[in-house]
Every structure is written in structure tokens, then in C-alpha cells.
Amino acid sequence: GAGVSQSPSNKVTEKGKDVELRCDPISGHTALYWYRQSLGQGLEFLIYFQGNSAPDKSGLPSDRFSAERTGGSVSTLTIQRTQQEDSAVYLCASSLASSNYGYTFGSGTRLTVV
Amino acid sequence: KQEVTQIPAALSVPEGENLVLNCSFTDSAIYNLQWFRQDPGKGLTSLLLIQSSQREQTSGRLNASLDKSSGRSTLYIAASQPGDSATYLCAVKASGGSYIPTFGRGTSLIVHP
């Protein structure tokens, strides 16, 4: 597609439920990133996928968070047993795996845990 | 570890003023630096991308400069308008390893009529 697409745009869930957030990167972009932005805070790196390499999961805050990327394209971020502190905007970005390229972000998914 | 700082954290100006937003980074070994704009509750929109070999980039009323040796970039906004109100973030792509960008905390700009 022309841009990075994220769905849903908004998600309200009850505490303890599992949620899945989807990111569809720009076609041909081999690098994909997930970030979290809590209210009034900066961007917190979560996970990075590059081609077929093992993902860099160093930013995942707990084992309740996981992500996968199927076929080197669409990625799903899963949060199990959601907590209120998981409420945030989850942003996805993609890029070409090259030193010269910048990043393109999606519009984000606003997650509210009640 | 790369650290990115943006000053000021917040700025409120009357319409028509020329503005300078600052971004500093601790490790000068970078591939590029990118400026973004973020409207409340929205994603990031890319404004300008400066490669490490470049000194500046321009787009309309925006001009971004890069001084890699001193670890600084500035975003200059000419003749500010209320529609420029947003948070401006800079991101650095460091060389020599992962392509994970490092972001500053942003400058929150309000331009009032």
C-alpha cells in the first residue's frame, strides 16, 4: 500500500483480556518497528523486525507482550492479560533496510484498558 | 548509548514568528536524522530527512540543518501559523549496528492567532 496501515484505530478492552494490534507496512519495506507512546510521554521502542532475521525484542516490557511478522509483511502485536498501564497509543513504522532511508509511521492504535 | 535531547520542551508563540527547534545527540556516528510532526493522538508525519553527509534540507517554510560533529540539528519554521501547532520530534539513525532509531522527547509547539 501507499502508507503504513494500522488497525484497529481505537480499541477499548477490559482488564485481563487479550488484544491483537495489526500493522501492514509499506510494500517492500523489510524493516518494521513497534513503539508505544503513553499519555504525555515519548516513544518507547518495543520490537524490531528485519527481513528473516530474529527480531530484536529488547524493548518488550514484559512476557505478556509478543509480536510476530508473517511472510515478512504484516505484523501483529499481542498483549495478553491486559493491564490498565498498557493503555497507550501503539505505533508501527516501516523502512527499507538501508542506511539512507528514513521511517514511515502508521496512524497508530489507541488502546484503552478499562 | 545514543541519547537525543530536544529543547525547548514546549513553546508558545504568536502567529507570524520565525522559530528554531533544537535537537542534540550524544554520538555523532549517525547515518541520518529525521524530523517528524505529531498531532495529538495521531501518528508521526515525516517532515525532513537529512543524511549525515548533508548540511541542510528544505521543504516549504521548513528548513532543517545538521552539524554532525557537534551533535546538533535545528528545525527552522518561518512565518509560523496556527496550523503548525503540534509536537515536533527528531530521530537519529545511528551507524554501526541496528537500524533502530533513537527519538527525542519532542517539542510541543502552540502557535496562537
Image (cartoon, helix red, strand yellow):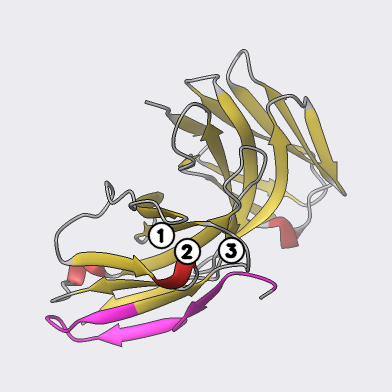
Q: Residue B105 at x, y = what percent?
A: 46, 43
Asked whether disc 1 touches disc 3, contact meaning CB atoms under 8 Å apart, the reply is no
Residue at coordinates 40% horizontally, 72% vertically from top-left?
A70
Please check whether the numbered discs 3 and 2 fall on a single chain.
no
Secondary structure type for disc 2: strand
Chain part drawn in magenta: A2-20
Do we see residue A41 in this rendering?
no
In-front residue for pair A14/B112:
A14
Asked whether A78 falls inside the magenta stretch, the response is no
* Residue topped by disc 3: B39
Secondary structure under the numbered disc 1 in the rendered image: strand
Q: Which residue is mark 1?
A: A34
Query: Vertically, is B26 above or below B105?
Result: above
Dot in front, 3 or 2: 2
**Gap in Å between the C-alphas at discs 3 and 2?**
16 Å
Going from N to C along the chain, the mark reached first, 1 or 2, is 1
Given the image, what chain letter belongs to the residue carrying mark 3?
A: B
Please name whichever residue, A72 or B67, is drawn nearer the observer in this view of the structure: A72
Residue A25 image offset from top left, x and y in percent: 55, 68
Looking at the image, which residue is at 25% across and 86% down? Answer: A13
Check if mark 3's residue and mark 2's residue have beta carbons within 8 Å. Answer: no
Residues at marks 1 and 3, CA–CA distance in whole angstroms = 19 Å
The residue labelled by disc 2 is: A92
Which residue is drawn at the image coordinates 36% and 59% (left, top)? A36
Residue found 85% across the figure and 47% down from its top:
B61
Pointer 3 local density, CA inside 10 Å: few below 14, some 14–19, many at least 20 = some
Q: Residues within 10 Å of mark 2 (few under 14, many from 20)?
A: many
Residue B11 figure quarter: top right
Going by the numbered disc 2, the residue's amino acid type is Cys
